[in-house]
Amino acid sequence: MPERIERVPREELRVTQNERLRETVQYAYRTVPFYRETLDAAGISPAEIETVDDLSALPLTTKADFREEYPDGLFAVDDDRIRRVHASSGTTGNPKIVAYTRSDLDRWNEVMARSMAAAGIERGETFQNAYAYGLFTGGLGFHGGAEELGATVIPASSGNTRRQVELARDLESDSLGCTPSYAIYFAETAAEMGVDPRALSISTVLFGAEPCTEPMREEIESRLDATGIENYGLSELIGPGVAVECREAQSGLHVWEDHFYPEVIDPETGEPLPAGEEGELVLTSLSKEALPVLRYRTGDLTTLTYDECECGRTMVRMDGVTGRTDDLLIVRGVNLYPSQIEAVVLEFDAVAPYYRIDLYREDALDRFELTIELEAGFDGDADRLRAAVRKRLANALSITPDALELVEYGTIERTEVGKVRRVFDHR
Ligand SMILES: [Zn+2]
């Protein structure tokens, strides 16, 4: 049964959001010079922001702002109140450093416990945490949430997969937290060890930190005979714990709107979009102390749905993120997200959940090569399969690869630690 706040009538939720938003804007203005300067420059006084409907008047905050204010320019409290910092890896430039007061950590545990409960994880169960511990928010975020919920945590962290399989088998883990690609790798490793992954007691895989398409979720569910539940979050806002699918519907992720206010904007113009239209997710924290965040551009593309959910939760749902504005590939003038390719190729039963995309430029033209892996023991007609995949790509995405290579099962490199990399842009 969802907690009361998760199924509060929306008018009542709105009152809480407005109150917290007013406090957050005034607090950020008072304590963080960056916000004072950007609001002043935009000619906005914090007093003008009375309700969430006024939010669009505020300037957007970007990843670049986090980098420029490195390491602690966005912190709103004195050092002696900070209990922990995390950092999100930057491939370019400074990492983003994020901070938590004691009460931020308590709230993080609370939203994580809520997320895990929505995923169907219960008090007294054993949760195997295969998210990386360390500066990345995944490991400690799930750890705190599981303890808060009253589950037993196995702090396995990432990697060391044979050991993880043994732990899952011997300690009878009920649920596994990890990236979607790692869930597949875990199942493969178990099979290699002679352990039937479907016979393990894992009944829930709580995945996140990477985009995941529906066919990839089905792979996870069938390989582990478990329910796959997606969660969403980002360090800049808190870490994991911003939104999660409910087990009842598995249809969109409930955003914990009492703490994180979501908007969707047109990524080109920055204008807010009406509910139901796809755009870039923008989040405002409503209860953070160490690092209040106003209108943060997540770079994640999604849609918000305010329809009632069968689970009884009233909080808005966002679609699973299958594209980030950063991931957009432009190939011969066609806009393409890697997840769109994944969704097409994994429709084929003969294709294993491994693929790579290589992009080159030859004589000022883009060259697109796609490599997909065949399922173990494939004995069908490779040419026919290749032709069928090409046709589906052309129909669904209006693009076909210049080269489509089918490789044997186990050929494409597996990722044991960190986020999987599937796109290699050599242009
Ligand atoms: Zn629901």
Image (cartoon, rainbow, N blue to C red):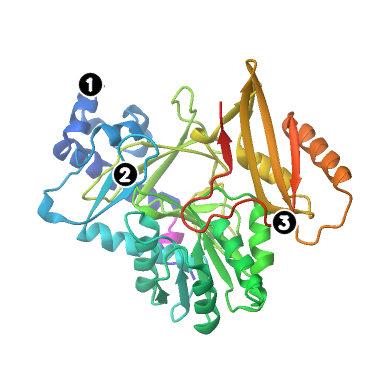
Give the residue at the far top of this rendering.
364
Q: Residue at x 75, y 41 (%)?
A: 405
Q: Quadrant of ligand 1?
A: bottom right
- Residue position for label 3: 409
- Residue position for label 2: 18
Q: Position of residue 323 (x, y in %)?
A: 55, 39
- Position of residue 169 relative to residue 244, above or below, is below
Q: Is residue 413 left or right of residue 110?
A: right
Q: Position of residue 220 (x, y in %)?
A: 63, 62
Quarter that holds the C terminus: top right
- Amino acid under label 1? Ala
Q: Is residue 228 left or right of residue 255?
A: right
- Amino acid under label 2? Asn
- Position of residue 45 relative to residue 413, above or below, is above
Q: Earlier in the sequence, mark 2 or mark 1?
A: 2
Q: CA distance from mark 2 to mark 1?
A: 24 Å
Q: Residue at x 19, y 38 (%)?
A: 73
Which residue occupies the foreground of this view, 373 or 273?
373
Q: What crowding class fits label 2: few (fewer than 14 Cα within 10 Å), some (14-19), or many (20 or more)?
A: many
Element type where label 2 sits in the image: helix
Marks 2, 1: nearer the viewer: 1
Q: Main secondary structure of the magenta part?
A: helix
The quarter holding residue 150 reads: bottom left
Q: Position of residue 51 (x, y in %)?
A: 32, 38
Marks 2, 3: nearer the viewer: 3
Which residue occupies the foreground of this view, 253 or 79?
79
Range of residues picked out in magenta: 5-9
Q: Earlier in the sequence, mark 2 or mark 3?
A: 2
- Amino acid under label 3? Tyr
Q: Earlier in the sequence, mark 1 or mark 3?
A: 1
Indicate yes or no whether the magenta region holds residue 7.
yes
Q: CA distance from mark 2 to mark 3?
A: 54 Å
